Image: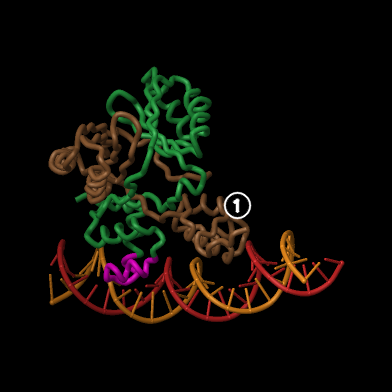
Chain colours: A brown, B green, C orange, D red
Amino acid sequence: MPKRSSKEESTTLDKTDLEILQLLQHNARITIKEIAEKVHLSTTPVHERIRRMEERGVIRQYVTLLDGAKVKKGLMVICYISLRQHSKMAGNKFIKSIQEMNEVIECLTISGEFDFMLKVVAENMDAYYDFHVNRLSQIENIGNVQSVFVMGVIKQTHQLVW
Amino acid sequence: MPKRSSKEESTTLDKTDLEILQLLQHNARITIKEIAEKVHLSTTPVHERIRRMEERGVIRQYVTLLDGAKVKKGLMVICYISLRQHSKMAGNKFIKSIQEMNEVIECLTISGEFDFMLKVVAENMDAYYDFHVNRLSQIENIGNVQSVFVMGVIKQTHQLVW
DNA sequence: ATTGTGAAAGAATTTTATTCTATCTGTTTA
DNA sequence: TAAACAGATAGAATAAAATTCTTTCACAAT
């Protein structure tokens, strides 16, 4: 059996790991002490398990979610984009532009009529219009752009394990 | 001038608040001490500012993001749904069903041809097919359902202030 | 000028994280 | 079969951080 590299120690997640992840998903600022109590372990193994899951990349990031309306980002728009040209280089240029636009909080490559789906936030319709016309549409190689407005958020979670 | 209720103290966010939010958005487990150093304040006012933003709901939640592929949720699908009937009650029933489905991590009300846009995660195509046919399509009052598959994630952030 | 208010610093205290050592359990190896 | 080993854990010791309290300062209102 080949010896495993000391990095990327690929074990599977056991029941306790999943319990810890559940707790962290709900509240990234929960203390290790509190987790330990809930999973019936001492702080040491909990600490160690979290460290390992961070190292393995199971845990990607601890983030804080804000209320969009309260930080002047009350408008959300889904934006579909197709490129005129689909060469690798053309695609990479587009991606680079998108990465630099703070208004774009999500960009997915999708199947179907369009190439990309963007989630864009803005303060209001004027701000979005400005973004659309003066920044998004100015990216070279952009083909079709179609905006769908989000009227309400019914559900929004990041809970991948349960 | 009317006296303000002691709850919901609605002040505006100053530059320092925004700096603190930026740091917390990137890393929800950053220590108050470290924030304090970066914004050139002592821990006391930082602590107080965070508490206030939590209370006001500017800060919605501290969450941990996981790597979908590493927790057996490697497939992401965008799913468009229209209802047959648009009465308030029919809508509420649908919403209730959606809330209970862990595979649905996002549900938005949108303008255009469809009523809702869902983001669904699953382990693989088989699991998604099962979800689609046996659970999603079984909700009463469902009209059209259209699935768009996510081939890649170009960008995914939660940074609303920058 | 005086009072009041809000924000902040700094010290004191409490709580938590982190590290270290020892133990326990189950498995491999001689 | 017994000894050696590895992995996970508990518990204690230490280091670091959070939280609370008191005091000070700056500015606005009276």
Q: Secondary structure at mark 1?
A: loop
Please state the horizontal and vertical placement of residue B102, each as a whole percent of the image: 49, 38
Looking at the picture, does residue D26 appear above or below residue A11?
below
Q: Is residue D6 left or right of residue A120?
A: right
Please say if B130 is above or below D1: above
Q: Which residue is mark 1?
A: A14
Q: Is residue B66 above or below residue A116?
A: below
Identify the residue at image location x=42%, y=27%: B92
Where's residue A150, x and y in %? 29, 34
Q: Is residue D24 left or right of residue B61?
A: left
Q: Is residue B66 visible?
A: yes
Provide the chain ID for the residue under circle 1: A
Magenta stretch: give its range: B31-46
Q: Quadrant of the C terminus of chain B?
A: bottom left
* Residue ID at (23%, 54%): B12
Q: Main secondary structure of the magenta part?
A: helix
Query: Which residue is located at x 58 percent, y 66 percent?
Result: A44
The amino acid at mark 1 is Asp
